[in-house]
Image: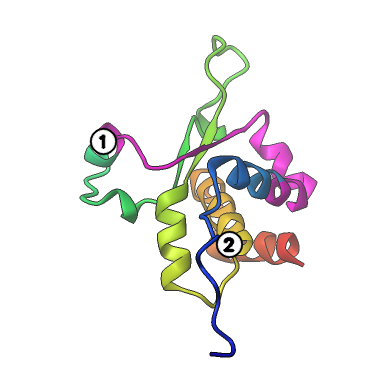
């Protein structure tokens, strides 16, 4: 049958594949936005930890695609003692599940969207601000 995809040899993108896509998305984000984030660490995990899901009152790990962990700029001080860097977690399995259900978006676009929105919401950017940042990063 013409037009069918042969899935026999296909595999889902790995954690390493996600790291490459996320790093590429990060580099496409305008420098002013990246500067606000400082030494942000992007981590790829299959799912959020049960403790995180419980804390956020989320029943299914497939319902959380990303999470920002750290202090917002209004809570940081030059007098703070050194601590772990701020992090964005991208949850591979939840993102893949979303991607397969919404086939009109590329995986790269979804990862970029989640990355920008996790950072943006944490720092108080408006949805319009994040949409503009995302538009610049995907074109």
58 vs 64, left or right, is: left
Q: Label 2's element?
A: helix
* Nearer-the-camera pick, 28 or 4: 4
91 vs 19, left or right, is: left
Residue 81 to residue 5: above or below = above
Image quadrant occupied by the C terminus: bottom right
* Nearer-the-camera pick, 12 or 21: 12
Residue 8 to residue 42: above or below = below
Q: Label 1's element?
A: helix
Residue furthest to the bottom in view is: 2
Residue 83: x %, y % from top left: 53, 15
In space, the residues marked 2 and 1 are separated at their CA atoms by 25 Å
Q: Which residue is mark 2?
A: 107
Q: Give, as a single range, the part of the protein colored magenta.
A: 24-52
Residue 47: x %, y % from top left: 37, 42
Q: Which residue is mark 1?
A: 50
Residue 67: x %, y % from top left: 44, 43
Which residue is rendered at x = 57% and y = 59% of the image?
113
Q: Earlier in the sequence, mark 2 or mark 1?
A: 1
Magenta span contains residue 101: no
Crowd around label 1: few <14 · some 14–19 · many ≥20 (10 Å): few
103 vs 109, left or right, is: left
Q: Can residue 32 be seen in the rendering of this structure?
A: yes
Which residue is rendered at x = 54% and y = 63% of the image?
127
């Amino acid at each position: 049958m013409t037009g069918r995809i042969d899935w026999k040899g296909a595999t889902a993108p790995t954690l390493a594949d996600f790291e490459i896509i996320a790093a590429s998305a990060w580099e496409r984000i305008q420098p002013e936005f990246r500067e606000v984030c400082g030494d942000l660490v992007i981590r790829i995990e299959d799912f959020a930890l049960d403790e995180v899901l419980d804390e956020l009152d989320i029943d299914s790990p497939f319902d959380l695609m990303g999470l920002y962990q750290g202090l917002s700029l209004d809570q940081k001080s030059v007098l703070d003692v050194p601590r772990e860097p701020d992090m964005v977690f991208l949850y591979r399995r939840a993102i893949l599940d979303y991607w397969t259900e919404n086939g009109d978006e590329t995986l790269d676009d979804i990862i970029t969207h989640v990355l920008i929105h996790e950072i943006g919401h944490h720092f108080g950017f408006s949805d319009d601000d994040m949409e503009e940042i995302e538009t610049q990063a995907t074109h």
